[in-house]
Amino acid sequence: MPIFQTGGAAADPLVVFDGVTKRFSAAGGAGEVAALDGVSLSVPRGHITAIIGRSGAGKSTLIRLANGLETPTSGKVLVDGVNVAGMSEAGLRGIRREVGMVFQHFNLLASRTVFDNVALPLEIAGAGKAEIANRVSDLLDLVGLSDKRNRYPSELSGGQKQRVGIARALATEPKLLLSDEATSALDPETTRSVLTLLKQINRDLGLTILLITHEMDVVKQIADDVAVIDGGRIVEQGSAFDILATPRHATTRALLAGQPGHRLPDAIAGRLLAAPVDGGRAVLRIVSATETGGTLLADLVRPLGEAAEVIAGSVETVGERSFAALVVSLPPYQAEQIVASEPLPDGLLSAEVLGYVA
């Protein structure tokens, strides 16, 4: 049975950033720097929403606004309809019981056992000993650490420490869980196990999760929705599948450039030209949805005709959906005809000329 359950329809926003700007004093006192600039974003209740972007884009500042660790210079931050930005310190203490946070480097207290680390938020909230004992036992069972209750952080692996951090974040039965690069310090196998746990918590407890990450595999595995931030502004947002399969903004494309469904061989990328040349060819990327991931890449290229030459291709899975991406070279006129088709040929989600080669 779930330890707790949050309600609400999936489309109902639990968190709303409404025209949020955050400025910090510049180094040396030379004016101000805008970390966030007019950000508006809704986080659907019950969803896992990922914020992605380059270092310094404003991801951490944005997520810290949701529990009052940062205060916006202007705009509103609503958590379940309550404006966090306008709350007193006493009010923020109440909000922080409803918003759990998981950190990149665990932030466990070395002098406290696993049990006592998880119990800490309940002690601060004034819970009784019996309530604490029952709640912590349930949480340690949830994260698979019942046998580690009397161990200290120094005796745990990185994955175990992060599971303790997750249990602690859930102690006060929050409506929202914030994840600040929670898997970036973990190896790939441990990352997968922690992501599986977060997905389980989201599914079984109905908990809304807002996470920031620079790891696209994290987004693929657990995110429902994605927002891309660049220079303190949201430049693209949508379902995780749509963003990863058919990115529209240059920043998103740059972030995904190294992913299998987007990567060009170096020998081709270094030769790309902006305009066609006599006797040259166009480089075309086409994307097709496939629910099973079993679409043969040959099925994509066959309708393009004998003139098509395959450069690269892959089938990528995002959550429970898959897409096939293929990069081919074609005579320029043929590639441009495909891109200009209204609608696109059957089965294609997108078609884009990436450039031209001699």
Image (tube, grey):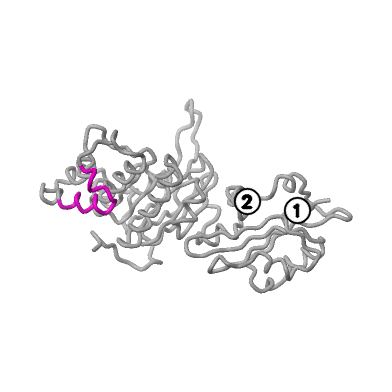
Considering depth in this image, is 79 or 131 the residue closer to the camera?
A: 131
Are discs 2 and 1 less than 8 Å apart at CB?
A: no
The reply to whether the magenta stretch includes residue 143 is: yes
Query: Quadrant location of residue 348?
Result: bottom right
The residue under the point 50% across, 62% down is 239
State the SS at label 2: helix
Locate the N terminus and report the quarter of the image it occupies: bottom left
Q: Given the image, on which type of amino acid does mark 1 rest?
A: Gly
Q: Relative to 265, is 78 on the left or the right?
A: left
Looking at the rendered image, the disc whose residue lies closer to the viewer, 2 or 1, is 1
Task: Tell me which numbered mark, 2 or 1, is placed earlier along the sequence.
Answer: 2
Report the magenta stretch's main SS: helix
Q: Is residue 38 left or right of residue 348?
A: left
Question: How far is disc 2 from disc 1 in space, using C-alphas?
Answer: 15 Å
Residue that lies at the very extreme toward the right in this rendered image = 278
Give how far across and how far down residue 52 sits, in percent: 50, 49
Find the magenta span and give its range.
134-149
Callout 1: helix, strand or loop? strand
Q: Amino acid at mark 2?
A: Ala
| Image point (72%, 47%), residue name | 269
Q: Circle 1 is placed at which residue position?
A: 355
- Give above or below for 286 relative to 53: below
Q: Is residue 350 left or right of residue 221?
A: right
**Badge 1: how crowded within 10 Å, few (<14), some, or many (20+)?**
many
Q: Is residue 68 magenta?
A: no
Vertical arrangement, residue 53 with respect to residue 4, above or below: above
The residue that disc 2 covers is 250
Q: Is residue 103 above or below residue 346?
A: above
Q: Position of residue 33 (x, y in %)?
A: 50, 37
Write the residue at 48% across / 43% down: 58
